[in-house]
Amino acid sequence: MTLSRLFAALPLLALAVARADDAPPKPPYDKFPAADAPYYRVRYAPSAKADELAYGANFTLWVPPGVKRLRGVVVHQHGCGEGSCRSGLTGAYDLHWQALASKHDCALLSPAYEQPDKADCQKWCDPRNGSDAAFRKALADLGAKCGHPELATVPWALWGHSGGGHWAGGMVLLHPERVAAAWLRSGVPLLKDDPARKGIKAHALPAAALKVPLMCNLGTKEGVTVKDKQFGGVWPANELFFGEVRGKGGLVGVAVDPLSSHDCGNQRYLAIPWLDACLTARLPAKPGDPLRAMPAESAWLAPPLGTAASPAAKFEGDPLKAGWLPNETVAKKWAEYVKDTKVSDTSPPPAPTNLRRDGNVLTWDAVADVESGLAGFVIERDGVALPAVPEPAKNPFGRAVYQGLQYSDTPPQPLVPFKFTDTTADPAKKHEYRVRAINTAGLKSELSAPAK
């Protein structure tokens, strides 16, 4: 080809590259819920550049209706592997995590990295490989989309599972001034070179990261009581991370799930109250101000593999070898969790609202209970309870949850609607309906206003 023909072809070559970059996601990442307000979505195509994200990435945001100014963003980060990555497509739709975000005027963000089957997870779960930059770009772009430009600069509360724990911990080490708290489920970043974790690059531990509340959470079958299975290396990695951070005075705890392996189990019933306590303490009263320090006087301590906690001032033993907990309320929930994961709750969920009837079809609005989420609903027709909705709620990894839960702690598709069809109604009668919510602790809400 002559030079003149080559130059003439360049615009076409550039167009071909642009079309390839803008190509839609491929299965299994091509099916996801609609992102109509209050949901918003951006997607970035994979990049071939060495310093950019090698995989496509889909970021879905939920903004609490009516919020005037966002104070932060709660990030729910999936783990490694095609199945876990796909599960990230629904994370922003989780009612329980929405309740936590809404309480603090925060948005809820769920990334979904389009990692191909059996591909290298480090290409996204190490944030230095492009996912840090893609995440921050997504915050800016989504902030513009939803009319909250402050999203680009607000603090982050991070939750991550497996490779997502590696990612969340890595973001703490890279941006400690931005992170209010981070919950690391079954995955932590590497702080020193470890022959057992070949191919994983160690992070530096800056002094500022020692002020960020962290929780190392894993299943007992991940190397604590079961050491020779697939996930037997999780506890040794957590133990090293905990020892390094806590030994330097870092605010890090350990919560071992006594029932689970690498699945998430019932961790949300401790993770959400823990994050709630950290956000309450750390989010600044004035937007734009730095994060506040955790109050030292309220801290409790507990042995990493123990079952009892005590106030820090009364702890017997080396405090730099004990797990840190933010306050007494969380310490009591931690003790329940590490015993049998049955975190107690005495607060009923909010009552459903806006009950509507169209023939024999009922729909309504509802929000989850911050403490215990949402297990289901009871429909009352003329004061008599009909079968529960759904019947029964299911969750293979822990408490029954209305939306259901996947391995990486997100709802499955299709999302379960707030809807009930009364197939036993007498068409000759004028019925009155009410609905009440049930949380996962079995507590019932007040009845909704009636629909006739």
Image (cartoon, rainbow, N blue to C red):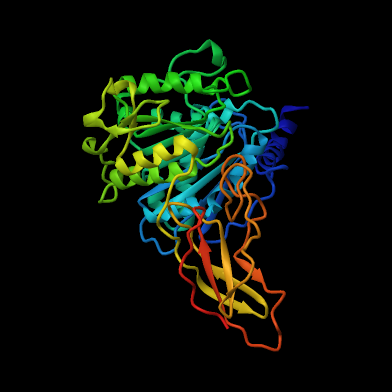
Residue drawn at 53 percent across, 55 percent down: 40
Quadrant assignment for the N terminus: top right
Residue 167 seen: no
| Residue 375, percent from left and from top | 55, 56
Residue drawn at 49 percent across, 53 percent down: 441
Residue drawn at 67 percent across, 27 percent down: 119
The residue closer to the viewer here, 310 or 39, is: 310
Q: Is residue 216 left or right of residue 232?
A: left
**Number of residue marks:** 0
The residue closer to the viewer here, 175 or 449, is: 449
| Residue 442, percent from left and from top | 51, 56
Residue drawn at 35 percent across, 34 percent down: 213
| Residue 11, percent from left and from top | 68, 39
Q: Is residue 120 placed above or below 438 in the rendered structure? A: above
Q: Is residue 26 placed above or below 32 in the rendered structure? A: above
Q: Is residue 363 placed above or below 56 in the rendered structure? A: below
Quadrant assignment for the C terminus: bottom right
Residue 129 seen: yes
The part of the image, by quadrant, that contains residue 369 is: bottom left
Residue pushed farthest right?
1
| Residue 426, percent from left and from top | 70, 83
The part of the image, by quadrant, that contains residue 215 is: top left
